[in-house]
């Protein structure tokens, strides 16, 4: 029951923060793009959480430990904090855009943004289904092994790839071109995180160096 309570509290807090930032920046609750995104975002997050609760409570427990201050590596705590700020900025800038009318995004692009958010969540789900060791913090758990199947056969960090797709979708779903600017800032932050993560795993996880030799690309096949 403790795990369920932690999950529900985290879910409610995230909803409150996202709604406060999005509609606070917009200066009005009459922001249909904001409501559509929040419904889609939390429907996807809720379905994944229910799946984890039913089929992989160990992974759910690992995920609820994530956040600033939870990492052993001090640099990763900085990275987590920066990522959180960028996430909020990716919601706030479109809200301000909505308030002041800086850009005009067609409804079709808004729908595309919502679809990208769903695709990002779908990638994350595939990662969770394939790898029960996908902790919210960088660590090596007892009995952990290298996973090289499913999305891990394509890129070494598929969950980060899914997060990037989601970050592109967020400002578009909120009807803002300007929101793409803070969203782009997540790229170097994720790059910093995964490079440090790879160095840690190569040292601590048996077989990871060989896996890097088999799967060349980190985030995008053919690119990087």
Image (cartoon, rainbow, N blue to C red):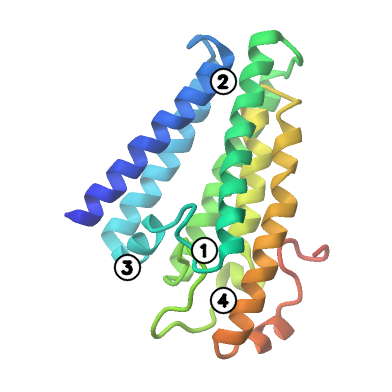
Residue 88 in the image: state x and y as whole percent: 57, 34
Q: Are marks 4 and 2 in contact (CB under 8 Å)?
A: no
Alpha carbon separation for disc pair 1 and 3: 15 Å
Which of disc 3 and disc 1 is earlier in sequence? 3
Report the residue that reaches farthest toward the front: 74
Task: State the residue position of label 4.
Answer: 149
Crowdedness of circle 3 by 10 Å Cα count: few (<14), some, many (20+)?
A: some
Image: 154 above or below 145: above
Which of disc 1 and disc 2 is earlier in sequence? 2
Residue at image coords 75%, 15%: 104
Q: Secondary structure at mark 2?
A: helix
Q: Secondary structure at mark 4?
A: loop
Task: State the residue position of label 2.
Answer: 33
Which of disc 2 and disc 4 is earlier in sequence? 2
Pick the quarter of the image with the N terminus. bottom left
Residue 45 in the image: state x and y as whole percent: 42, 44
Say which of marks 3 and 4 sits in front: 3
């Amino acid at each position: 029951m403790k795990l369920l309570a932690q999950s529900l509290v985290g879910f409610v807090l995230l909803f409150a923060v996202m709604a406060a930032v999005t509609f606070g920046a917009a200066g009005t609750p009459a922001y249909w793009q904001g409501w559509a995104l929040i419904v889609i975002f939390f429907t996807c997050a809720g379905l994944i959480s229910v799946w984890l609760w039913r089929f992989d409570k160990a992974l759910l427990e690992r995920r609820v430990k994530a956040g600033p201050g939870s990492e052993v590596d001090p640099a990763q705590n900085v990275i987590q904090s920066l990522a959180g700020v960028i996430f909020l900025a990716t919601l706030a800038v479109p809200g301000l855009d909505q308030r002041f009318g800086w850009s005009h995004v067609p409804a079709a692009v808004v729908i595309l943004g919502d679809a990208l958010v769903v695709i990002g969540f779908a990638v994350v789900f595939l990662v969770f289904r394939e790898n029960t060791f996908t902790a919210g913090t960088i660590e090596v758990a007892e009995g952990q092994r290298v996973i090289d199947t499913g999305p891990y056969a394509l890129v070494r960090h598929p969950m980060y790839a899914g997060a990037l797709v989601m970050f592109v979708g967020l400002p578009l779903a909120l009807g803002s071109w300007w929101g793409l600017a803070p969203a782009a800032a997540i790229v170097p932050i994720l790059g910093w995180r995964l490079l440090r993560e790879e160095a840690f795993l190569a040292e601590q996880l048996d077989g990871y160096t060989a896996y890097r030799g088999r799967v060349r690309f980190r985030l995008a096949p053919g690119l990087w």
